[in-house]
Image (cartoon, rainbow, N blue to C red):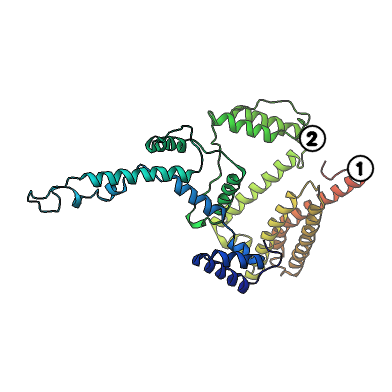
Amino acid sequence: MSRRRLSEKDFWTKYCRAEYLLRTKNTLAAKAEAADDEELAMFLKNDDILAKEAKLKIKRVDPTLDMEADAGDDYIHLPDHGVLRDGSRETTDIDSELARRTLSQDLNRHAAVVLEGRSTDIESTDTKTVAEALARSKKEPPPSSAADDASHERLVKVARMTEIEDLQAPRSLPYAPLCIKDPREYFDSQQANALRPLGSNDGRKARSCSLNTDDAFRHLMDQISSVKMNCPVVQSDVALKVLSELNEGISRSRRLNLKNPQDSLLGRLPHRTREELMDHWTAIQELLRHFWSSYPITTTVLSNKVQRLKEAMTQIYQKLQDIKESAQPDVRHEISQLVKPMTQALDAAFYHDQQQKSSKAGTGSKPNGF
C-alpha cells in the first residue's frame, strides 16, 4: 500500500494510466514511469493470481491433440453428409498433408516441453515419448510452496468477501435430535428435580423420581397434613350454629315470599328504604368475604387491606343505624329485624379483629394467626 491516502480522482487517474501502458505494451515507458512514481508502480506490478491462472491454462494444453482433425469433426465435413458426391472426388489425404500434420504435432509436443521449463525423468529425443512423460508428470500433485499457499489464501479471501447473501444457501445451526425412549420417565424425573430444593432435601424424606397418580396424591396429602394449623380459624360448633340459623332464615323468608310478597318484611317497607337496605346488604357481603379471606394477617399488605375494609364496614354500620332511627314508627320494627343480621355480622368481624390485636399484643412479635 502507498504511504499516503489517495483521493478518488488520483486513484482512477493512475489506474487508467497503468491500464493504458499495459494495453499498449510499451515496456520501456512503463518501467520509466514506475521508477519515478511509486504509486503508479503498484498498478504496473504483476499480479500473482493472474500469473498463476495463466500458468494453469498452459499446463492444461494437450500437445497430442490434433487441432485440424478436431476442427473438421462435424457432419458437414463427413462423407455423404451435406455434400453432393458423384464419385469423381475422393477425400483421401495425400502424403504432404499427412507429413504436415505429423510435423505440427511434433512441434506442439516440443513446445509443451519447452513451456514446462523443467527436465523430465527420461532422456530421449523422441517428442512423442517426451510428451507422454510430460502428461504423466502433470497428473502428479505439484510441489507446494509458500507463494502458492499465499495465492490460494488470497483467492479464498476474495471469494469469501464477494459472496452474495441472496444466492447463499440457508445457514442452519446443527442440532442433536432428542432420543427419548420412554417420555414418562423423562418428564417424571424432570418433575422430581424441580421439586427438590437446591443442594438439600429441606429435611424431607427422599422420594422416587417416578410416581404414579396414587403415590402423588398420598404424598400431597401428607404434605398438607404436616403444615396444617393446630387451631382452626373458625370453631366448628360456632360455624354449624351460624349455618343452621342462616338456613332457617332463608327457608322462612322463601315460604313467606311464595305465599304473598306483600306480607314479607321487604314488601311492607317503602321502595327507597328497601333499595337502600338491599344495596347495603350486598356491600356487606362483599366486604365480609374479603375481610375473612385476609386472615391470618402475615404481611403488611394484608394488614392495610383489613384496615380499609374496617373503615368501609364502619361507614355502612353507621348508615344502617341512621336508617333504623329515621324510619317511620309503623315500619321501624320491620327495619330493625332486617338490620339486625347485618349488624351482627359486622359486630362479629369487629370482635374478631379486636381479639387478634389483643393476642398479638400479649405474645409480642408473633405473627397474627399463628
Q: Position of residue 287 (x, y in %)?
A: 72, 57
Residue 263, picture quadrant: bottom right
Q: Position of residue 50 (x, y in %)?
A: 52, 54
Q: Which residue is mark 2?
A: 230
Near mark 1 (Cα within 10 A), the count class, few <14, some 14-19 or many ≥20, is few
The span from disc 1 to disc 2 (Cα, nearest Å) is: 17 Å
Q: Amino acid at mark 1?
A: Thr
Q: Quadrant of the C terminus?
A: top right
Residue found at the very far bottom of the displayed protein: 9
Q: Position of residue 281 (x, y in %)?
A: 68, 59
Q: Decide: is 364 above or below 280.
A: above
Q: Quadrant of the N terminus?
A: bottom right
Residue 36, picture quadrant: bottom right
Q: Are marks 1 and 2 in contact (CB under 8 Å)?
A: no
Say which label, 1 or 2, has the lower sequence index. 2
Q: Decide: is 182 above or below 284.
A: above
Q: Decide: is 268 above or below 160.
A: below
Q: Amino acid at mark 2?
A: Asn
Q: Position of residue 124 (x, y in %)?
A: 43, 33
- Residue beneath the point at 75% across and 70% down: 326
Between residue 316 and residue 253, name the one nearer to us: 316
- Residue beneath the point at 79% across and 58% down: 310
Secondary structure at badge 1 equals helix
Residue 221, picture quadrant: top right
Q: Which residue is mark 1?
A: 363
